[in-house]
Amino acid sequence: MLPRIAIIGRPNVGKSTLFNRLAGRKLAIVDDTPGVTRDRKETEARLGGRAVMLLDTAGLEEAPPETVAGRMRASSEIAARQADLVLFVIDARSGITPSDRAFAAWLRRQPAPVLLVANKTEGRGGGMAAYEAYELGLGDPVAISAEHGEGIADLHTTAAELLPEEEDEDARTRDNRPLRMAIVGRPNAGKSTLLNALLGEERMITGPEPGLTRDAVAVEWSDDEGKVRLVDTAGMRKKARIIENLEQMSVGSTIAALKEAEVAVLVLDGLLGMDEQDLRIARLAEREGRAVVIALNKWDAIEDRPAARRALTDVLTASLAQLKGVEVVTLSAMTGKGVDRLMPAVRKTMERWNKRVPTGELNRWFEAAVAKHTPPLADGRRIKLRYATMPKARPPTIAVFGPRAEDLPEDYRRYLVNSFREAFDMPGVPIRLHGRGGK
Ligand code: GDP
Ligand code: GDP
């Protein structure tokens, strides 16, 4: 199933011309007579570097349903409802009309992200018409000339951000695929012991000396919930090398493992607590957008457990706000105590990482969050935030739209991210936020 892209707009704004431009073929009939594109046409095309199914629709017209125009409108509406992305085309030469406004209002309530496309801007620069178009509440328009092929590269780039994630990450295929997990942590934290405990058999060698030579492992197993694949993990493939190289080596292989994994279990040596090296690994996981679960290991050997827990919470609060509320599982890889709580915590975190918030719900949160704290000034001018979309999960990614939204200062972004994390219960999950605005 390719993502479906619906081209919507009132008659004669240039939908068919855009369709042909994107399809690279003359499939739709282009005509000066309004409403000449009667039927929905569709074709495979590429948008933003992705294969998509492109739908040309009959023009949107406000008309009673029993008329031809009314039926055309109905079919456009169906296309919009089923689309993964709507390209809402307006005619920059004729300006915004009341029916543009009516359909914009309707589109804002639809689940699919909408990209506003201002057509017929040839020779007039991109910024033109943009201001008026903001009134539609659909964010920054992409200015193009479908007929002359101007602005099309821009359109591709912007659409790429809004397209749903790649098909191979689709939930249906995901169900049959093993969960990809990395076990990361500094040497001697107990990663190999933990893996053995998870597997319930002595498949790996563990030993007290850091830097012990071990072979690379690729392990897959199943539990009640499904398959788990352990991706190549730092510290488990320490080759016999000189010791100075070890740290560097494990950073490199940790990054490699994180790139491959969906979720990282960060194993801490409970006797030592979380130190700078552990923080660095956690930040790498954050940077790679991975879900994180902390295994606080060697719990059997810890005398003051409340103090050990407190110490960890303090470090996390002070140094790793992004991982606020991360799942922490106290366990003993050696005795096996608590190990059974690890995979449920991993799956819970994965669910959050996979979560998509429907656009309506997202915007109810967004409006409340923005009302509570209005965005600050940037260069003395107010940043107006209009609406938000969630173009992808894994990790959860929010796009906020409005004039100058790209200039949002860091602390306001953090405010939005934290508010989002709280509102939708996503602790321990890195969240991305993109501001998309005007020039
Ligand atoms: P549709 O009814 O929305 O599918 O619109 P069409 O694609 O049939 O285009 C309607 C008219 O607008 C045609 O005469 C096109 O040649 C013209 N048109 C389309 N794109 C552009 C453009 O970028 N610039 C100008 N000036 N005219 C355009
Ligand atoms: P790795 O380098 O992270 O793979 O760590 P290992 O799994 O090789 O463990 C390092 C050392 O810590 C070994 O001596 C283990 O026996 C010990 N160890 C691992 N887990 C535990 C645990 O839960 N409790 C205690 N007391 N020792 C542990």
Image (tube, rainbow, N blue to C red):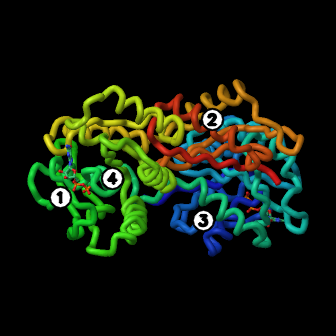
Evaluate if marks 3 and 4 touch, with contact meaning CB atoms under 8 Å apart. no
Which residue is under mark 4? 174
Give the crowd class for mark 3: few <14, some 14-19, many >=20 residues within 10 Å. some
Which residue is under mark 2? 109
Type of the residue with mark 3? Gly
Whether disc 2's CB lies below 8 Å from ligand 1 is answered: no
Which residue is under mark 3? 48
Q: Is 212 left or right of 419, judged from the image as shown?
A: left
Q: Is 68 left or right of 437, judged from the image as shown?
A: left
Type of the residue with mark 4? Arg
Quarter of the rendering containing residue 150:
bottom right
Q: Earlier in the sequence, mark 1 or mark 3?
A: 3
Which quarter shows the C terminus?
bottom right
What residue is rendered at 30% in x and 41% in y?
271
Give the crowd class for mark 4: few <14, some 14-19, many >=20 residues within 10 Å. few
Evaluate if marks 1 and 4 touch, with contact meaning CB atoms under 8 Å apart. no
Q: Position of residue 306 (x, y in %)?
A: 33, 26
Which residue is under mark 1? 207
Element carrying mark 3: loop
Q: Position of residue 87 (x, y in %)?
A: 66, 53
Element carrying mark 1: loop
Q: Earlier in the sequence, mark 2 or mark 3?
A: 3
Q: Is 86 left or right of 277, judged from the image as shown?
A: right
Give the crowd class for mark 1: few <14, some 14-19, many >=20 residues within 10 Å. few
What residue is rendered at 90% in x and 64% in y?
124
